[in-house]
Image (spheres, helix red, strand yellow):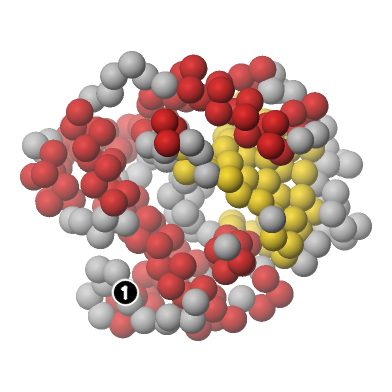
Amino acid sequence: MNIINNIVYQQVKPEAALADFVDSYWMLHNTGDEAQSVIGLPDGRVDLFFTQSVTQPFNIVLIGIGTRTHPSVIDPHTLMFAISFKLPAVEYILGFPIADMVDGAKELPNDFWRFNVKDLDDFDAFCEKAAQKLLSLLPKEMDERKRRLFQLIYESKGEMSVLELSERVYWSARQINRYFNQQFGVSLKVFCNILRFRMSLEHIAKGRLFPELNFTDQNHFIKEIKKFSGAVPKELFKNQNDRFILLSAIRQQ
């Protein structure tokens, strides 16, 4: 468990059986009496939020893929539990496309998957309930091309080109991009760039302000980081007032 200003942050990784579909379970709790201004950064995940605050009733919201920074305010005493999904979960667990949710969200019924406000009483119990529900939804089989494609994308941290991925899974780049755009609302290349950006944050958090992944040169690295975060690597590393919440969490892991 980490504390960023008055925000308590905790993350739990899923069991092995869910690792291809779930990135993590996590929670944020603003324990203070003042609102906290934070900036969310693109991370390539699809987040299912379960939230309650003193001003807002319990609600469940699904957040699509982010392609830019998202400034937000976390109200006093707001409690958020979340499931962060990898892309295969969109088709094989959620069961509906999220193409219309890029940089956006969709409110779900307050009894979605039979969760309710009492599930916010205990984070460990929430993770266990979520795991059991997700295990019950696991597909009996998965398209082998898609399974292999996502495996390569995540293992390479977004560094493999669309052409190489296409050749490795015997699936045309045109068909892959059609699938990505229809299901997720972004092209394969854009998603890989987001994933590479997300992985670069781990280096930046440690003060390594030079490209370690597949960037052409230092200028390309700086340009890509600024495109997704609105800040150059040096500014991200300083992270004044811990305003980049994802980077702060990475730094404390």
Q: Is residue 228 above or below residue 64?
A: below
Q: Residue at x 62, y 40 (%)?
A: 82
Count of labels in the image? 1
Mark 1: amino acid = Glu
Residue at left offset 80%, top offset 34%: 121
The residue at the far front in this view is 16
Q: Which residue is mark 1?
A: 212
Q: Residue at x 18, y 32 (%)?
A: 145
Front position in the image: 103 or 247: 247
Q: Is residue 153 left or right of residue 87?
A: left
Q: Quadrant of the N terminus?
A: bottom right
Above or below — where is 80 with respect to 88? below
Find residue 252 and report its horizontal and vertical position in percent: 61, 66
Res 218 → quadrant: bottom left
**In the shown orientation, is residue 186 left or right of residue 63?**
left
Regarding residue 244, the answer to whether it shows in the image is no
Q: Quadrant of residue 100?
A: top left
Left or right: 173, with 101 as reference point: left
Quadrant in which residue 120 is drawn: top right
Query: In the rendered view, would you say 249 is above or below 217?
Result: above
Q: Nearer the viewer, residue 236 or 11?
A: 11
Residue 43 visible in image: yes
Location of residue 7 in the rendering, given as x and y in whole percent from the top left corner: 76, 58
Quadrant assignment for the C terminus: bottom right
Circle 1 packing at 10 Å, graded few (<14), some (14-19), many (20+), is: few
Q: Is residue 156 above or below residue 58?
A: below
Q: At 52% from the left edge and 44% from the top edge, which residue is drawn? A: 13
Of helix, strand and loop, which one carries label 1?
Answer: loop
Residue 32 is situated, as x and y percent measured from the top left of the image, at 87, 58
Q: Position of residue 25 (x, y in %)?
A: 58, 41
